[in-house]
Amino acid sequence: MALLTAMTPVAQRVGASRIVTGGRIPHPASDPTRPPDAERAFRRNLLRVALRALQTPVTEPTVFAVNA
Amino acid sequence: MRVAHYLNQFFGGLGGEDAADTPIEARHGFIGPGIGLQQALGARGEVVLTIVGGDTYVAEHEADAALAIADCLREAQVDVLVAGPAFNAGRYGLACALACLTAQRELALPSVTAMHPDNPAVEAHKRGLYVLPTAATAADMRRALAALAEFAVKLASSSSIGRAEVEGYLPRGFRRNEHVDRTAAERLIDMLHAKLAGQPYASEIPNQAFESVPPAPPLADARQSLLALVSEAGVVPRGNPDRIRFTAATNWASYGLDVVQPGSVEVVHGGYDASFANEDPNRVLPIDALRDLVATGEIGSLLDRYYVTVGNGTPVETCAAFGAAIAAELKQAGVGGVVLPST
């Protein structure tokens, strides 16, 4: 399970194993400051990070960050 | 002080599992552990009534059992009810809880029970009861009876019962204001000094501990996997057909991905600014982007349903139960990995 969230300290504290950041609280999967096509591309890239997280072995809460 | 004592079929001397169907019976005086209870009470009270109930009978006939217990207590005119100790016996613990709650509700009779903190009755009923902690087995009987006797005396004398840590019962989850002489700032600095000096200190508010869940092994290959979307963002079909609450959700639901279009869904989660999601639900449920990745072959396939609840103010235990139920369905469907956007 890959958790997409902006609240990484909370996610780490409760013990979520694979944490993906890049969005913000009201839009954890996206960046609406971008124009629509770029926003959709951002969503794809964020999900690619989520796929990488799902395929990475972890032993403790691990944050995978999306680079803008 | 006249004391009533509730026991199950085993401690009441009726037998083991073979006698677990015994309905409620009343006996004058004390039996079994009641002997120890009377000894601990000494001259301060008399165990005048023992109520014995089969654990299975009580579990399967709660209403009838409660009526019978109330009748026995009413007739005997007692000042306090002591139930158990039940140690780690689940049905017995629940029966003790039922007896105490019945006494309180029907007769305004003070009551106390005792059991191991892990007994399921504690989690279910601790708010309504005084539960004294015990060890897991009856090896702790003597000490537990003594503690019950002391507490019963306190209850019957109607001196007010103080905080859980002071009086020795399991914390019930209530918060009461108290006046203390030193300000919070002073108490906090003392705690900080102690902490920095490596000395013991006691937090006034216990830090919530979270169950440690071992990470799942990694997905072998996303390109071959079936993935699913699970969400706590409360995006549901317009009209909220399953009535998911905007806070402290009591249920979850599953809907087809095709339901999710701007205008045909609404956000029922009361804890985040829903304007972004209302404009484009893909911002919290990235269905379009997931489908793009399926089209490029980066994901094998996407489950045609998504799962949703509202995470706003929903207790951890509730969410854990939801998660387990959803995971069971996902496993059934052959899902290998989950993307969970969280607001």
Image (cartoon, coloured by chain):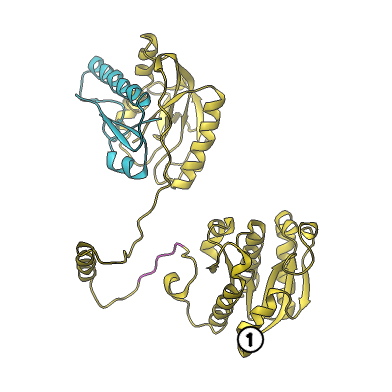
Chain colours: A cyan, B yellow
Tell me where the magenta segment starts and ends, as one range.
B173-177
Q: Can residue B241 be seen by looking at this rendering?
A: no
Q: Can residue B53 be seen by looking at this rendering?
A: yes
The residue carrying pointer 1 sits among few (fewer than 14), some (14 to 19) or many (20 or more) residues within 10 Å by Cα, namely many
Which residue is pictured at 71% across the width and 70% down the height? B70
Horizontal side of residue A6 vs B48, given as left or right: left
Residue B172 position within the rendered picture, expressed as x and y whole percent measured from the top left: 48, 64
Which residue is pictured at 73% across the width and 56% down the height? B56
Residue A13 position within the rendered picture, expressed as x and y whole percent measured from the top left: 33, 45
The quadrant of the picture occupied by the N terminus of chain B is bottom right
Q: Is residue B190 magenta?
A: no
Residue B108 position within the rendered picture, expressed as x and y whole percent measured from the top left: 61, 74
| Main secondary-structure element of the magenta-colored stretch | loop
Q: Is residue B198 above or below residue B5?
A: above
Horizontal side of residue B296 vs B237, given as left or right: left
Which residue is pictured at 55% across the width and 76% down the height? B147
Which residue is pictured at 42% across the width and 70% down the height? B165
Q: Is residue A33 above or below residue B196?
A: above
Based on the displayed image, in which of its 4 quarters is residue B338 positioned? top left
Based on the displayed image, in which of its 4 quarters is residue B25 positioned? bottom right
Observer-nearest of A55 and B51: A55
The secondary structure type at the circle numbered 1 is loop
Q: Is residue B157 above or below residue B88?
A: below
Residue B227 position within the rendered picture, expressed as x and y whole percent measured from the top left: 44, 21
The kind of residue on which mark 1 rests is: Gly
The quadrant of the picture occupied by the C terminus of chain B is top left
Q: Which residue appears farthest toward the top when viewing the image? A: B296
Q: What chain does mark 1 sit on?
A: B
Pointer 1 residue: B45
Q: Which residue appears farthest toward the bottom when viewing the image? A: B43
